[in-house]
Amino acid sequence: MDKAWQSKGLKDYSTEAILGTLGHYGVQVSEADFRQLAEKQYPTSIAQGWMPNWKGKGQFAPFPFAAAGELWRRWQPERLAPYELSEGLAQLMGSLGQLLQGAQQAPVDAAFQRINEVRQRIPVNDKGEPDVNFMQEALRVFDERAARAFDDLAEMLARAGHVGHAEAFSDLEEFLLPDRRGVSKPIIRAARGEREPALEDLQKVATDGTRSPLSRVLAVDGLLHIGANDKVISVGRPLLEEAERTQDWHLALDLLARLEHSYKQLGERSSLAALAQDRARIEAAHDAAHPGHRRHQHQHG
């Protein structure tokens, strides 16, 4: 294996050459071993498992990650690799970004077509939701700025009048991140001027006891985002009491920050004073439940 592999990629090298290089630097792996690993893991996790024995330095330091991806392509060709979703998503976000900047020829339709083909192949659980480990690996490559762009994209498209693309993107978002189901689409409705139905949709998710705590907080965030501070309080207050009852202290801390923001916006001084007492009690309970665990700042997004 020569040093040009980094610029050329591995697709033109033989499987023997890839396995030989892995072996040379401390990782012995056969096709049978790899298949066994692939039953429970995806390429990045497989490569991370190899790293403790890896002796490659310099240009060969990142080789296991490239090798795991390439061996997956050869030995698991019928299965989607997480990086294929990462690439499709990056391409789609790039073309939608061009569209928002006014590029008439942005290749949006082709990017949507590609991501929809990828979507059909994403491994799902028995509820039809994407496999969590697959999604973690696929989304790990996006930095915070890209994650923020992903979060804002559907709403920006709707505001710019690209309603069809906004809906298609939020449909994808709600599939990839099931906690956002019923949260992403109402934000678009609000951006299109349908504020009341949007508020109803978000309140429905926030008060639905069958939904995950994260889903319900995201719905509260949606209400905050639209500026419905009174609704944040009407759904957030019972949710806070429920979090305290079930001793979900992190959820309670997240909700405190959101309620505090809304009370401040509405100028409700007496409610803020009462909330300060709630905060003292909940923080004490959190610290007792998690000794030595520094409280991270819980703020609304």
Image (cartoon, grey):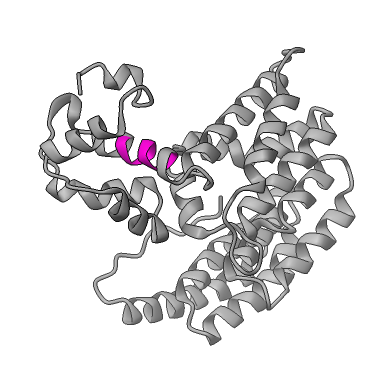
Quarter of the view holding residue 14:
top left
Q: Would residue 61 appear left or right of 285 to someone viewing this image?
A: left
In this rendering, is residue 110 above or below 141? above
Quarter of the view holding residue 202:
bottom right
In this rendering, is residue 251 above or below 266? below
Q: Would residue 16 appear left or right of 172 to someone viewing this image?
A: left
Q: Dividing the image into 4 quarters, which one contains the N terminus?
A: top left
Task: Give residue 179's position: percent from left, percent from top.
Answer: 62, 60
Q: Residue at x 58, y 62 (%)?
A: 260
- Numbered circles on residues, count: 0
In this rendering, is residue 209 above or below 84? below
Q: Magenta span covers which residues?
A: 67-73
Q: Residue at x 11, y 36 (%)?
A: 24
Tell whether position 54 is magenta.
no
Q: Residue at x 53, y 82 (%)?
A: 244
Tell whether position 69 is magenta.
yes
Q: Would residue 74 appear left or right of 49 to someone viewing this image?
A: right
The residue closer to the viewer here, 214 or 57, is 57
Seen from this angle, which residue lies furthest bottom?
245
Task: Give residue 196's position: percent from left, percent from top.
Answer: 88, 55
Per the picture, the main secondary structure of the magenta-coloured stretch is helix
Task: Give residue 180's position: percent from left, percent from top.
Answer: 66, 56
The residue closer to the viewer here, 153 or 16, is 16
The residue closer to the viewer here, 223 or 164, is 164
Q: Residue at x 71, y 17 (%)?
A: 106
The residue closer to the viewer here, 175 or 26, is 26
Task: Give residue 182's position: percent from left, percent from top.
Answer: 75, 58
